[in-house]
Image (cartoon, rainbow, N blue to C red):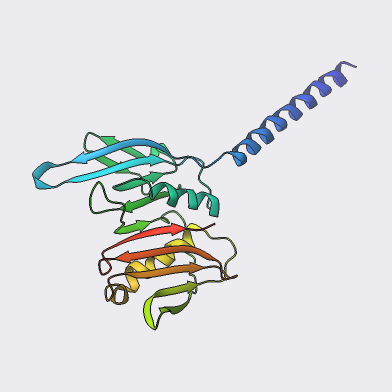
Amino acid sequence: MKKAGIFIYFLFGILYVVYVICTAIREEAEREPYIYPLENIYNSKWGYHYNADFFVYTNFKDKHLYIKYLFDFVGEHEGSLYILTRERDVRFDRTAYFINYESKHHFFTFSRHDSISLFNEFIRVNRRSKSVEIAFQIEEMLHDGNITGKKLKADFKEVNVNIIQQFLDYSIDHDHTARTSFYNYIYELYDQSDNLILRQVYTDYGKYFTIEMYE
């Protein structure tokens, strides 16, 4: 009887631990996306001016909802932004910062030309993952017979940061001549069902751009 009692207590203990773990996993899955401020860095020495805001996105998941929240958040905050998914992947020393580029966690960079701008010069959203090459179907977009941009379509159901980064690599790095030939130029990303996922709008002959993600 004594052994049976010990076994029952042990079994209940195991079940309780499993319950606690499952509850924690469920609560984590149900948490809304949330980004909080961490630090502001400003350096104006030797005629060099640099300003950047650091944020933390602890419950980021590589899924549409969380990526859209990221872009919506960035669209409402001025200046250059660094958004990390683990706070201890960066440390600060007065006007300097040091990022752990070897981290396996995501972090996102949004570079802008001054501290009050909402226009991007450069975006990096995929540093952690090894890039899987995406084959885009690319065609020019026309309006009243005039070229307005390019449509990029790929065979995917659920967007992720690898797909978005390759879309950005094309528009920022590989299609320089096209976007700098027009004052305004648009790049759009579509999924396999021809749903619009992302729109990137360049202005001032390819110098700056805004970006918007759709449901």
Rendered residue at 68%/36% (across/down) = 22
Q: Is residue 204 left or right of residue 210?
A: left
Return the residue nearer the eye: 138 or 104.
138
Residue at the spot x=76%, y=29% of the render? Answer: 15
Q: What is the residue that sits farthest to the right in this orientation?
A: 1
Picture coordinates of residue 57, whole percent (x, y) = 45, 42
Going by the picture, which residue comes out furthest to the bottom? 145
Task: Give the total of numbered labels.
Answer: 0
Determine whether 143 is above or below 198 in the image.
below
Q: Nearer the viewer, residue 6 or 103?
A: 103
Q: Position of residue 35 (x, y in %)?
A: 44, 40
Q: Residue at x 21, y 37 (%)?
A: 95
Camera-side residue: 90 or 84? 84
| Residue 34 visible in the picture | yes
Q: Is residue 88 left or right of residue 155?
A: left
Q: Is residue 207 left or right of residue 5?
A: left
Q: Residue furthest top?
A: 2
- Residue at 24%, 34% (x, y): give it: 93
Q: Picture coordinates of residue 208 (x, y %)?
A: 28, 61
Where in the figure is residue 16, as x and y percent of width and height? 73, 27
Can residue 103 be seen here? The reply is no
- Residue 56 falls in image quadrant: top left
- Quadrant location of the C terminus in the rendered image: bottom right
Q: Quadrant of the N terminus?
A: top right
Residue found at the very far front of the displayed protein: 144
